[in-house]
Each structure stands twice: as C-alpha cells, then as structure tokens.
C-alpha cells in the first residue's frame, strides 16, 4: 500500500511511462508544487543531466514565473531539489 509521498513518487518512477508522463503524474499528485506543462521539458533536462553526470550547477531557463521568486533561471540541481525529483534520477 502506498502511504507516503515518497512511496507514491517511487511508484511513479517505476511505472512503465515516459519521463514526461511521470513528471505530469508527479505534478498532478502533488499539486502544491504548482508548475505548468510548459516546464516539463526543462525538468526533464535537469533529470537527464543528473543521470548522465552532467554539471548540476548549469542554469536552465524556465518558463516565466515557474520558480519561487519568479526567477527565469535555476540550476539543474536546485530544480531537482525544489520539485522533489530525485526519485527520477
């Protein structure tokens, strides 16, 4: 039985879905992390950067107003942290 946010995230991560679909489910199930569909490609890029050993300090451009403080750029590592995406790495 899935009882915690971590259990739910892990189940999504293990599902036979594309990474994009996993991210969509992640944000549907955790609506307090408000982010639009237009941010999915950027978050996918951050995850892929982490998976391949890329530089997590690399700044990625987000759609306007999609991060705390309305910043336009955030590091890949910070995006993974803010949106609790570590389970997908």
Image (cartoon, grey):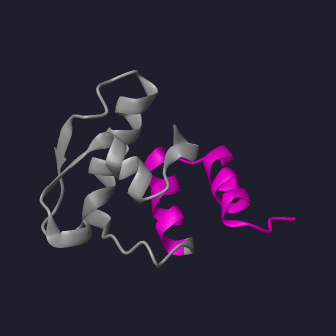
Q: Nearer the viewer, residue 13 or 6?
A: 6
Whether residue 72 is visible, yes or no, is yes
Residue 24, percent from left and from top: 46, 63
Whether residue 65 is visible, yes or no, is no
Q: Nearer the viewer, residue 19 or 27?
A: 27
Q: Residue at x 80, y 69 (%)?
A: 3
Q: Residue at x 25, y 63 (%)?
A: 38
Q: Quadrant of residue 59?
A: top left
Residue 17, percent from left and from top: 57, 48
Q: Residue at x 16, y 70 (%)?
A: 70
Q: Residue at x 41, y 39 (%)?
A: 47
Q: Nearer the viewer, residue 35 or 19?
A: 35
Q: Which residues are magenta?
A: 1-28
Q: Quadrant of residue 4?
A: bottom right
Taking the magenta stretch, the answer to whether it contains residue 25 is yes
What type of secondary structure mainly makes up the magenta span? helix
* Residue 14 vertical placement versus 48 (above, below): below
Residue 49, percent from left and from top: 35, 31
Taking the magenta stretch, the answer to whether it contains residue 58 is no
Quick check: 19 left or right of 71? right
Q: Quadrant of residue 12?
A: bottom right
Pick out the residue farthest to the right: 1
How many numbered discs, if any? 0
* Residue 86 vertical placement versus 72 (above, below): above
């Amino acid at each position: 039985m899935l009882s915690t946010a971590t259990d739910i995230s892990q189940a999504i991560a293990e599902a036979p879905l594309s990474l994009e679909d996993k991210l969509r489910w992640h944000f549907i199930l955790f609506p307090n992390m408000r982010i639009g569909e237009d941010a999915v490609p950027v978050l996918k890029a951050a995850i892929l950067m982490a998976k391949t050993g890329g530089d997590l300090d690399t700044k990625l451009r987000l759609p306007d107003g999609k991060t705390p403080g309305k910043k336009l750029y955030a590091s890949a590592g910070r995006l993974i942290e803010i949106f609790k995406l570590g389970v997908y790495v």
